Image (tube, rainbow, N blue to C red):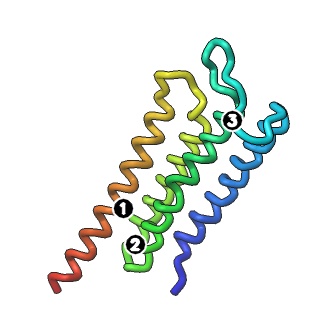
């Protein structure tokens, strides 16, 4: 069975993840920090390494689960348009969070990215649950 939408989405997000990982490594090198997250500035500004690490970590926390849901929905035969919508929103959510995570609080980008990511997981989970329920009615 081929899952072209999931593969395409995972491929695009894989490139983004490597980019985020490179930023973490660059921040480590610039800050001379081999392990840990660096030192916070006296004004409370987080270290660039902390920001890069959280950007990468947040991605690693949410993307795998989202891709699993997308792949299962695709394998289940969900309509292509809905799959592409979920895939596109996932990529948009990750881009919003990747670029907006370091803005000062209140942070509308981070709020929007998180709301979109969580809403997407809920929508895909609900869609999957509905598909299972529907299949049991037949």
Residue 51 position within the rendered picture, expressed as x and y whole percent measured from the top left:
64, 34
Q: Nearer the viewer, residue 8 or 122?
A: 122
Question: Disc 3 or disc 1, which is closer to the eye?
Answer: 3
**Depth check: 12 or 122 in front?**
122
Callout 1 secondary element:
helix
Q: Is residue 98 left or right of residue 122?
A: right
Q: Determine contact: label 1, label 2, CB under 8 Å.
A: yes
Dot 3 and dot 1 residues touching (CB under 8 Å)? no
- In front here: 52 or 4? 52
Residue identified by numbered label 2:
73
Q: Which mark is residue 124?
A: 1
Count of picture labels: 3
* Position in image of residue 121 (x %, y %): 39, 56
User: Gap in Å between the C-alphas at discs 3 and 1?
Assistant: 34 Å
Bin the neighbour count of mark 2 within 10 Å (Cα to Cα): few under 14, some 14-19, many 20 and up.
Answer: many
The quadrant the C terminus occupies is bottom left
Q: Point out the tag, 1 or 2, that comes first from the N-terminus.
A: 2
Residue in view at x 47 percent, y 72 percent: 71
Mark positioned earlier in the residue sequence (3 or 1)? 3
Where does label 3 land, which residue? 37
Image vertical order of residue 34 relative to residue 88, above or below: above
Marks 3 and 2 in Cβ contact (< 8 Å)? no
At 77% from the left and 47% from the top, the residue drawn is 22
């Amino acid at each position: 069975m081929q899952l072209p939408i999931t593969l395409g989405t995972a491929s695009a997000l894989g490139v983004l993840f490597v980019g985020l990982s490179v930023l973490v490594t660059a921040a480590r090198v610039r800050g001379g920090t081999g392990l840990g997250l660096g030192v916070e500035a006296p004004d409370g500004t987080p270290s660039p390494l902390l920001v890069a690490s959280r950007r990468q970590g947040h991605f690693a926390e949410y993307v795998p689960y989202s891709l699993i849901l997308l792949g299962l929905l695709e394998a289940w035969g969900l309509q292509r348009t809905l799959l592409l919508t979920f895939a596109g929103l996932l990529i948009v959510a990750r881009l919003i969070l990747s670029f907006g995570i370091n803005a000062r609080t209140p942070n509308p980008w981070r709020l929007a990215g998180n709301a979109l990511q969580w809403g997407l997981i809920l929508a895909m989970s609900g869609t999957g649950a509905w598909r299972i329920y529907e299949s049991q009615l037949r």
